[in-house]
Amino acid sequence: LQEGAAILSGIAYNGKDGNGSDRWDGVRDVHILRYEFGMDFQSVIDSFNVGTNTFAKKFLFHLLFRVYLFIYLFVFLAMFCILFSYYLNAIDWVHSDAFAFLPSPHTCTLVLPSFLATFSNIKLLHNSE
């Protein structure tokens, strides 16, 4: 009954196919033959709840990708600011007389932040897989 009402109101019109005949499957949410005769679980997922799957692919996943990209860029910018402040601090230590003869502050200030940045990037890449 609902499918007939959708067809009569024109909501179900989905353009024309390759042969030029009209398609009236705009609100069809299940591809029955694909669902029944699918050979794997992915064909069952692709043939059932088609409208929601299309919406999720087109909008939700692209939105989540943009949010993830924004967060990743924010973390990268924060790491860059931290490293830049460490390097400025190292330059200040190099020019001061108190720490000029000690190699350990230079080593800690120059090497440790680079190690931390590399480790956190490896951890981010490992968690994303």
Image (cartoon, grey):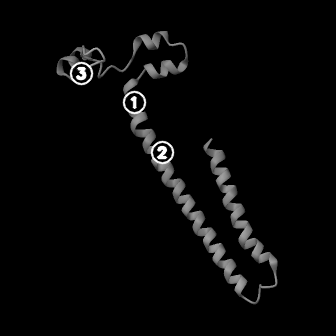
66 relative to 54, above or below: below
Q: Would you say 21 lies left or right of 65 here?
A: left
Please give the residue where the numbered disc 3 appears in the rendered image. Answer: 13
Residue 89 drawn above or below residue 114: below
- Write the residue at 22% across / 17% down: 7
Residue holding disc 1: 54
First in sequence: mark 3 or mark 1? 3
Label whose residue precedes the other's in the sequence (2 or 3): 3
Q: Is residue 70 left or right of residue 91?
A: left
Quarter of the figure with residue 120: bottom right
| SS under mark 1 | helix
Outermost residue to the front = 19
In the figure, 26 relative to 89: above or below?
above
Tell me the residue that label 2 is attached to.
65
Q: Position of residue 110 (x, y in %)?
A: 72, 71
Vertically, is 4 above or below 11? Answer: above
CA separation, marks 3 and 1?
17 Å
Q: Residues within 10 Å of mark 2 (few under 14, many from 20)?
A: few
Of mark 2 and mark 1, the one earlier in the sequence is: 1
Residue type at mark 3?
A: Tyr
What whole-number distance in Å separates the C-alpha atoms at marks 2 and 1? 16 Å
Q: Residue at x 40, y 36 (%)?
A: 58
* Kind of element beneath mark 3: loop
Please give the count of numbered marks on the rendered protein.
3
- Helix, strand or loop status at disc 2: helix
Image quadrant where residue 50 sits? top left
Tags 2 and 1 touching, CB below 8 Å = no
Residue, far bottom: 97
Q: Amino acid at mark 2?
A: Phe
Gap between marks 2 and 3 measured at Cα? 32 Å
Residue 126, image x and y in percent? 66, 45
